[in-house]
Image (tube, coloured by chain):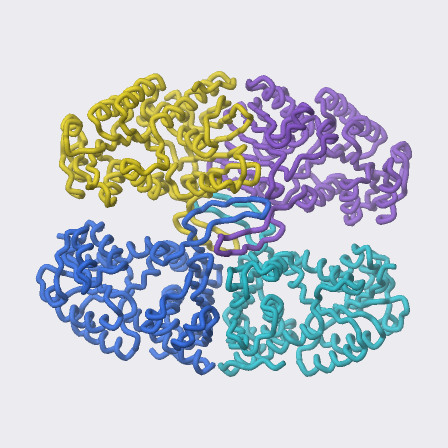
Chain colours: A cyan, B purple, C yellow, D blue
């Protein structure tokens, strides 16, 4: 029998996940919740899901799993609620902006033995998966160094930035997770710096729009990461890992692969201009992986500990940027 | 009110089109027909379409348009049937393997003023559309010459080849249509050659597995095309058009964009190994274009005349390969 | 002791070869001849070579080899002169514009047992050599089909075109030689077409500026070639050979490998704009190969027969373009 | 009249520079010095230069300029010697491994008004020059961030490492200079880390073989640099600069630009395996630039101050790696 899902939060990412659930033969979208009636109604109409309250979903016998696309400040308490109600939980990252709160939440998850998957979607991107597979297959030997580049087409609205936790917890956290995912274990210290280069308003919000970091592992391995909130040529997402026997790199994805050559040279169109078009395959893959994991398939989904790990690195990176010193990453 | 569709032929391509119809807000999949109950049932279950006979669909008041994914030898008569029944028709290419039969069919379409779209899916591929747009925008000046490459991962089964009409009508016909689509009008003669290089069985079926052609326009423009039924590195699909001011080229699509560098060099994964994964966007786009055209949007779908044109080129190419002479293409 | 060279014709290509001879430890440039004193003087000054007459060079005991960079209509008689004088001869292509004359010349070469190398410089380009090596190593299995693209930045002056023998003998002849070089043996027939698309003056000279051809081997192998006298983005030189186990392709050479990404997309600079910068390595390599061959190294230089072969294909291609029929290539 | 040059140090890099001087119409190679007679003799024979002592060259009236390819520990004193003797000086980097010694040397250069060029050859690489030109042309707006990657095929011998000053002063110093060259001015602080990942022997010599750094400018601009002494796929040299309006990147140079596609994917050959083949154009260009500068051409050669600047960054980076803190770069 297909797994019965509820989605909380029917905004744009909620709609993406709803489509993935509906398209999976082993799952069915049974319920949806959103404080905005119109949003809930849209998903309800399209996929035949009931509109229900959070409490009803938690109490329902006909719901096996929930997907949390709610605001970040609700994540931890909702994970706890549904874990205690015996539901499997998929939660968009981050679990919380403070690692202490995440630790408390994960204790509940552990006690209730609930399944919790954290939405590090990039782990399911075909290109990054290809890099991971190349490493796993031993093609580059032991991974030693890395270079990760993430550049957004433009900064999000000030309102978003205010509640985002800042560039390290909101944006570079994806790269921290990618570093752990590809290098295979946790770094032990971080050097980082941040500045405001694209929009002075971001400085008034106490955040950076440009940041660089070096992760360092106990045995000397190193990964360099750069982030910017500005990339006029599109959504720039690259990873390269260097090992003892070679390098594996994921290139940017060009939605239109043409080249026009004129007297001025060879020109290719820009990259995707939006993370949701860039990661369309990754979003579908991650929900399918969640459903497969609930069906007993082993093979790796990012769990609560992964969410905590990336946050711990982000907290240390922020502290490094503030103090101009290397900061140890707690375990 | 959404347009109500019926699909005839619920095999793999029928299922692809069913998904596209179901995913379009301006259309609904009302009926499906397939002589194999299981196939019809699959589509019926997934999209809530009624299973009906061909005659019922033709007679039905609640069907606006049909999509024909039936065997080629049924296309012409079914187009005529549904055109006379007042339905809009989307038909997979080719309309028929003989141009005389196609001409007769198109007369019926003309008399009944039916809308007929022919499934030249590649016109809706994002990369080829990009080349077309670059030409339309004047970026390469007047198009003058072209190079089109199509290579299949492997030959289809002998049974398929027998009824396919041969490499020029079955495979290179896509490239002939692409040449007309990108150059803007019909060539006037063709030089072609064919041979069997990959599988002697193909020779026993009276077909070629390798073919090259040069199309020539009245004013001297030239397009070179090469086809092979073998490409061990995947489904090779490239186009380049040279104009007075430059060149526009569509590159191959790599499903996984990674590069692994070792002492042996830099390696990227192979191409798609199947046309249905290579053209997944094109298939969705063409059905959406059909629905948009039925909704009154002008902007170009391949119609019956396009199907006839490509077939006329294919017939002339085959004759050229058989006679080792340039053959004029009738209009 | 180093081989002692004379160069006849001290124009731009003569100067390139002079530099190559001077830079080779096993050779020395002893003499130079050019009807224009200034040209001869330039080479003489730079490399310390004597200025001598053609007759003196032929009679000289201290000259081992000559390099002919003279006008085409002098090639055959000079080859004969120096062959009879016991010199090794490097001759720029073509030996002559008429195959009958070439056959007569090669008889003299054969009788005198002279070494004659023909300047098919592209065989010594590192990228085309790489393709050849990949084929020789068996990496793509048996070569079956090919696509060769040569596009010049612009047409040469009318005066040059008049005496060039036309696009097939002057330009596509390089591609014919490349096809033989890479496929390993001679094609047996050719289909070709030509037209004037870039400059009407070329038509008044009885030549084409745009041409396409299909070479066909007895066993069905096929190579498609396209040529144009116009490529605004630079000197376009590409080759790809398809075999039973894969493909080997030489890409264009970009003199500056940068990419600039802006809101308009990713742009790379144009190609070389001149064959002498494009083939700088090839020109040096071919003279070094000639010197090595004279020193007894076996390993392949293009000889008189190669020059004749390419010309035979060119003559057949021209006839095909004029008659719109396949033309057999004599052996 | 051509400028008369002397070369001190006739090893492999001295030979490269000798060829460049000999090939420049505005210069002549008059003298050579090397403590190893064989080395001096080789250059003397090939270019007709006299073999002379250091003192004779300094005292010679017929020498305008010297090129120092001597061991690093002789650089500063020889610069002073020849500056006082009224010669123009080209010196391979570094001037010295200690910034205080460099400052003293530069005082002599200033007092004597000598021309001193420091051999930061990468500034003359066509690809890096292209990036610089793109920035200068305003194509990417104001430069804000950068990513520089340098990876050597393998570590140099232990003897070399011992006297090299370590990875920051010997290897990353090129990247520090490149950062200043492309960003336009000096960074104000640096974060760095180093470790030994490829060869434990390097640790015993007190050096690193793997290093990462973040340069930071006063206004918040950031450049990330990674270095490794191991890259099995060849000599990896990449630069990308991000500005307010876009990005300019120099790609790696592949000596053979072919691609072989098989069932295993698309493979390109490795990179250059040696810095002298990778930078062959850069070495020629830098000597030509020196000669042009001596001839009065303005337009930028790296001078003593540039050598000092890069060393100051390297010293700060080493201190940062040792202390795990950001270190200010003195001016």
In x, y percent, where is residue C179? 45, 31
Which sits in the foreground, D278 or B87?
Answer: D278
| Quadrant housing residue C210 | top left
Which sits in the foreground, C277 or D236?
Answer: D236
Vertical placement of C122 versus A205: above or below? above
Instruction: Mark yes or no: residue A171 visible.
Output: no
Vertical placement of C248 versus A76: above or below? above
Q: Residue at x 88, y 71 (%)?
A: A56
In x, y percent, where is residue B24? 77, 48
Judge left or right: residue A64 versus residue D120.
Answer: right
Instruction: Mark yes or no: residue D253 visible.
Output: yes
In x, y percent, where is residue B15? 79, 43
Q: Residue at x 53, y 66 (%)?
A: A146
| The N terminus of chain C sits in image quarter | top left
Vertical placement of C4 versus A226: above or below? above
In x, y percent, where is residue C48? 15, 42
């Amino acid at each position: 029998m297909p797994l019965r899902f509820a989605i909380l939060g029917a905004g744009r990412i909620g709609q993406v996940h709803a489509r993935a659930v509906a398209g999976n033969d082993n799952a069915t979208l049974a319920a949806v919740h959103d404080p905005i009636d119109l949003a809930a109604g849209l998903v309800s109409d399209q996929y035949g899901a009931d509109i229900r309250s959070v409490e009803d979903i938690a109490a329902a016998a006909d719901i096996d799993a929930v997907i949390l696309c709610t605001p970040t400040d609700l994540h931890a308490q909702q994970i706890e609620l549904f874990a205690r109600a015996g539901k499997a939980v998929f939660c968009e990252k981050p679990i919380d902006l403070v690692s202490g709160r995440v630790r408390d939440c994960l204790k509940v998850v552990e006690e209730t033995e609930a399944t919790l998957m954290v939405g590090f979607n990039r782990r399911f991107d075909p290109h990054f998966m290809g890099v991971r597979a190349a490493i796993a297959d031993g093609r580059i030997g032991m991974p030693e160094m890395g270079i990760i580049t993430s550049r957004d087409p433009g900064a999000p609205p000030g309102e978003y930035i205010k509640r985002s936790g800042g560039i390290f917890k909101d944006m570079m956290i994806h790269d921290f997770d990618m570093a752990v995912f590809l290098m295979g274990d946790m770094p032990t210290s971080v050097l980082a710096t941040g500045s405001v280069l694209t929009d002075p308003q971001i400085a008034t919000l106490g955040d950076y729009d440009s940041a660089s970091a070096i992760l360092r592992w106990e045995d000397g391995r190193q990964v360099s990461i750069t982030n910017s909130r500005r990339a006029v040529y599109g959504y720039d997402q690259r990873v390269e890992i260097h090992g003892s026997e070679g390098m594996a790199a994921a290139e940017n994805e060009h939605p239109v692969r043409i080249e026009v050559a004129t007297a001025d040279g060879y020109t290719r169109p820009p990259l995707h201009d939006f993370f949701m078009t860039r990661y369309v395959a990754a979003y579908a893959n991650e929900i399918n992986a969640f459903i497969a994991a609930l069906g007993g398939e082993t093979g790796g989904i990012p769990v609560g500990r992964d969410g905590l790990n990336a946050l711990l690195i982000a907290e240390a990176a922020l502290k490094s940027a503030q103090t101009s010193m290397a900061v140890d990453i707690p375990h």
